[in-house]
Image (spheres, rainbow, N blue to C red):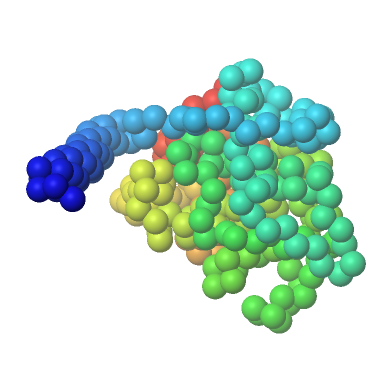
Amino acid sequence: MPYFLIIESYTFGSKIILSILFAVLAYLVFYYAFKMTEMAYVLKHKKPLYNHFYIFLRQLNAPQKAILQNHFLFYKNLSDKEKKYFEHRVSSFIKDKDFIAREGHRITDEMKVLISATAVMLSFGFRDFYIGVISKIVVYPNKFYSNTNKAYHRGEFNPKLKALVLSWEDFKAGYNDANDNLNLGIHEFTHAIHINSMKERDVSSTIFSDTFKELTKLLSINETLRNKLMASDYFRKYAFTNQFEFVAVIIENFIETPQEFKSQFPKIYAKVKQMLNFNVAGY
């Protein structure tokens, strides 16, 4: 090859390498500048800089949408734009998780849609809604025997196996009465979200975890509020078992009876709303 062609080829190759390096450097500068800007925003406003941003929106098929429309009140109360986001997230969640049936049961579209919709409802204010500590969802027809503590359970979250386990009978019962503050799906998914917030440092996990610490501090220093909470019949006593059950129970109440919650315990309500970044109608 002529010498001048070698030089020209070398120069061209160097330009490509320099262009790639410049592009990578520009990306890194932009990425970290954005992260710093968002963190400043989070510290000031206690919410993400943005929540919904998608290159394309996944869609549910007609029967799946009908399940949401007919059996999931939260979805029905969303705006048209929010419904599209919700459907995208439900479809994405279904695709991301392994659904496993037990005891001769069969996984149906109704199970996939309603279980996924429960997770998406709780994480609707999060940017990352996948709840990474869950990889599989195991569904029993009814109560099941758990080797964890050698007892029958209606639901449990096993972080070691990354498995959320549910009794379908009891999951459905949780939605039969929308005002009794008892919902198995909400309760078990909240456990997973709580543990996920302790492991991950994405914006939404940070807000959830930090706000829960703020709530814990509020209750520790405000004796009047703490005594009122303990004496109230609004939260079932199971809430005071430990911090994990406390979060799960108060979020059950938050989702099912938000106005009563806000009326009786406005400070606690505000913290829960901040934890979930819940900015939808009715809350």
Q: Residue furthest top?
A: 80
Q: Is residue 1 left or right of residue 279?
A: left
Q: Residue at x 86, y 69 (%)?
A: 103
Q: Nearer the viewer, residue 259 or 4?
A: 4
Tell me if I can see residue 105 in this picture.
yes
Q: In the displayed structure, would residue 164 be above or below residue 248? A: below
Tell me if I can see residue 183 in this picture.
no
Q: Residue at x 80, y 29 (%)?
A: 62
Q: Residue at x 40, y 61 (%)?
A: 199
Marks counted in the figure total: 0
Q: Residue at x 42, y 37 (%)?
A: 274
How far from the left and from the top, in percent, is residue 207? 37, 44
Q: Residue furthest right?
A: 104
Q: In the displayed structure, would residue 109 be above or below residue 74? A: below
Quarter of the figure that contains the C terminus: top right
Q: Is residue 132 left or right of residue 169?
A: left
